[in-house]
Image (tube, rainbow, N blue to C red):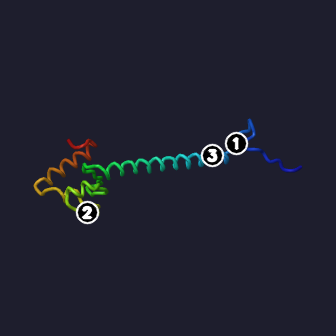
C-alpha cells in the first residue's frame, strides 16, 4: 500500500505535537516582532518629543547619564557627547551634591519621583 499524506488543514483533523510546537513558535515570533515594532515606534516618539522640547530631559541609570536632549546640554554649556556616560552629580554644584545623592537614593528605594 502506498503512503497516505494527511492534509494538516483537513477539517476535524487534530494537529500533531510537532505541528502545535511549530505554530506556537510562529505565534511567539510574530508577537515578538510586533513588540519590537511597538518599542521602536515608542522610542521614535520619545526622541522626537525630547529633541524638540525646550525643557531639559535626560535619562540616567546608576547615576550615569545615558541620554540628554539639546536643552540639557545647552543649560549646562556642554555638548551632548560630553554628558553621556558622566555622573549626573558632576554637574551639580558641590554644596548640593550630598542632597542630590540623598534624594536620588530615596527615589531608588521608594520608586517615587523627586518632589
Q: Residue at x 59, y 49 (%)?
A: 25
Label 3 vs 1, first from the N-terminus: 1
Q: Nearer the viewer, residue 99 or 51?
A: 51
The 10 Å Cα crowd at callout 3, few under 14, some 14 to 19, many 20 or more, is: few
- Image position, residue 110 (x, y; %): 26, 42
Q: Pointer 1: what residue?
A: 15
Q: Secondary structure at mark 2?
A: loop
Find out whether the residues at labels 3 and 2 contact each other: C-beta distance under 8 Å. Answer: no
Q: Pointer 3: what residue?
A: 23
Rendered image: mark on residue 70? none
Q: Nearer the viewer, residue 83 or 111?
A: 83
Label 3 vs label 1: CA separation? Answer: 10 Å
Label 1 vs 2, first from the N-terminus: 1
Farthest residue in the right direction? 1
Find out whether the residues at labels 1 and 2 contact each other: C-beta distance under 8 Å. Answer: no
- Judged left or right of residue 27, residue 10 is right
- Image position, residue 44 (x, y; %): 40, 51
Label 3 vs label 2: CA separation? Answer: 50 Å
Q: Quadrant of residue 7?
A: top right
Farthest residue in the left direction? 95
Label 1 vs label 2: CA separation? Answer: 60 Å
- Image position, residue 71 (x, y; %): 25, 54
In this figure, what is the number of numbered marks? 3
Q: Nearer the viewer, residue 91 or 45?
A: 45
The 10 Å Cα crowd at callout 2, few under 14, some 14 to 19, many 20 or more, is: few
Q: Pointer 2: what residue?
A: 79
Label 3 vs 2, first from the N-terminus: 3
Q: Nearer the viewer, mark 3 or mark 1?
A: 3
Amino acid at each position: 500500500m502506498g503512503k497516505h499524506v494527511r492534509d494538516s488543514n483537513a477539517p476535524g483533523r487534530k494537529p500533531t505535537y510537532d505541528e502545535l510546537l511549530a505554530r506556537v513558535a510562529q505565534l511567539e515570533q510574530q508577537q515578538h516582532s510586533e513588540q519590537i515594532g511597538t518599542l521602536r515606534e515608542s522610542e521614535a516618539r520619545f526622541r522626537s518629543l525630547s529633541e524638540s522640547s525646550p525643557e531639559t530631559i535626560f535619562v540616567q541609570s546608576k547615576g550615569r547619564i545615558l541620554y540628554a536632549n539639546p536643552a540639557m546640554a545647552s543649560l549646562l554649556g556642554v555638548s551632548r557627547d560630553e554628558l553621556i556616560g558622566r555622573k549626573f552629580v558632576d554637574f551639580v554644584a558641590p554644596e548640593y551634591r550630598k542632597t542630590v545623592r540623598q534624594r536620588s537614593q530615596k527615589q531608588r528605594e521608594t520608586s517615587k519621583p523627586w518632589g
